[in-house]
Every structure is written in structure tokens, then in C-alpha cells.
Image (spheres, rainbow, N blue to C red):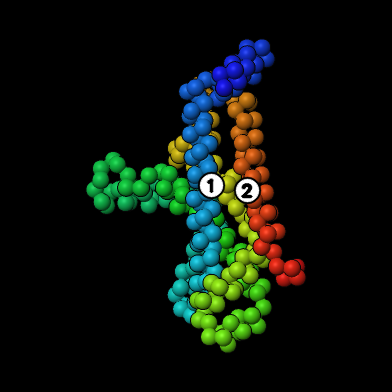
Amino acid sequence: MQFIWDWFRWLYQTTGINLTIFYDSFDRHRFTDGFLMTLKLSLICIVLSVLIGVVGAWLQGSKLRVTRHVLHWYIQFFRNTPPLVQLYFFYFGVGSLLRSSLGTGNQPLVSNVTWAIISLSFFAGAFNVEIFRSGVEAVPKTTLEAAESLGFSRLRAYALIVLPLAFRISLPALNNNLVNLVKTTTLAYAIAVPEMLYVSSQIWSDELNVPVMMNVLLVCYFGLVGVLVYVMHRWERAIKVPGFGA
């Protein structure tokens, strides 16, 4: 590997393309850590937002009016406010209240990484609720009636019959929302989460190689989103039911 690092050093000396993340071990390690943090944020938020969407779509059919109203205002709040404002609300607003009420001094009860995960998951989850709701409504009512006639409870019918079919219908829209979620993880920069954009800004501040690092970020996010889209499309084709939802 040393030959590769030396080549990037030679590239900088001959062309001025300063890719310190390859030939400088300190920059390489912190950029790698930032990339892994972005990957961690993306994967955790994807899983949590999908779970929120599945549960939320189920609760929208609740017989309790209070449950439906709470879910409605949750969706309205997170869909109609900027995700950066939501991030600040959780980190500076809720976070400061938790810290002061529990008497932990200057040490926050919840870390900035955890607040980023919570905020971004709720943001994407609000859209996922509506995505899954549309998928559930697209499942023929006769399918649910057939399940109930066989003795299925509402929960079992939803989990075993309605949700699998709704998931297949919802995948294209879900794919778009998850791609947007991966790109939105850059907002964690605002509360000092050491993700890829944050560490890149530190590197270009030290090395004055802003254009180079901007291009590196572009390539990295293009690769991350490309892998996600490829996996989702493969999954969509694999679970597609011929003749259903076309």
C-alpha cells in the first residue's frame, strides 16, 4: 500500500492535486472515521425510519381517535419543518432541558450522535408513514376480508398479509425517501457529529485543498447512494409479485 500512498504524494508534487487523505496517515484515518460515521448514521436511520413507517401506518388504522390525532400531528410537524431546524430543536432545545433538569452539569445526557439519529429517523419516518399508508390502501380490501374470515386478528392480518403486499407496492417511493435520508445525514455537521462532511471541512481548513475535498465528497456520496439504489432495485425485483401492483 505504501507504493499507492507515495504515488498520491507524487501526484500532489507534480500536479498540485492535494489528496492528503491518501498520503497523509493522520488525514487518512480521520477521513476514514468520518466515512464510517456517515455509514453508521445512514444504516441506523434507515432501519429506524422504516420501523417508524411500518408502525405508524398500522396506528393510522387505530380505532382510538387520540392515537390517530397524535400520529397526524407528528407527520405534519416533521414533514412541514426543515430537518436542520428539527436537529437544532432536539439538540439545543430538548437536549438542554434534559441536561438541566437532571443536574448533570455541563455533561449532556444524550450525545450529539444520538440526537442526530433521533432527529433524522423521525424526519424520514414521517414520510415513510405516508408511503406505507398508501401501500396499505392499495392492497385490495377483499384480501383483508379473506384474512379475517380465516380467523386472523387485525394485527396478524397486517403483519403477515397486508404489510408484505404493501411493502412491495411502496418500495419505489421508499427508495427515493431513503436516498434523500442518506444525503440529509450531512446536516449532522451542524451539531459537530464527526461525519464525512465535518471531517472534510477540518481537512480542507488545515490543507487548503477545498476543491479537491469537495470532489472527494461528491464521489463518496455518489458511491454510497449508488450502492443503496442498486440494492433497493435488486430487492424490488426479487420480491415482486407478477401481476400485482403493476
Residue 218: name its quadrant: top right
Q: Which mark is residue 42?
A: 1
**Residue at 72% across, 71% down:** 244
Q: Secondary structure at mark 1?
A: helix
Residue 175 in percent (x, y) is at 64, 55
Residue 181 placement (x, y as % from top left): 57, 50
Q: Which residue appears at 51% of the width and 67% of the height?
A: 56
Task: Please tell me which residue lies in front, 140 or 164.
Answer: 164
Q: Is residue 220 visible?
A: yes
Asked if labels 1 and 2 touch by Cβ distance under 8 angstroms, the answer is yes
**Horizontal and vertical percent position of residue 227:** 64, 45
Question: Residue drawn 61% across and 72% down?
Answer: 136
Residue picked out by circle 2: 228
The three-letter code of the residue at mark 1 reads Ser
Q: Is disc 1 surrounded by few (<14), some (14 to 19) or many (20+) residues within 10 Å?
A: many
Quadrant location of the N terminus? Answer: top right
Q: Secondary structure at mark 2?
A: helix
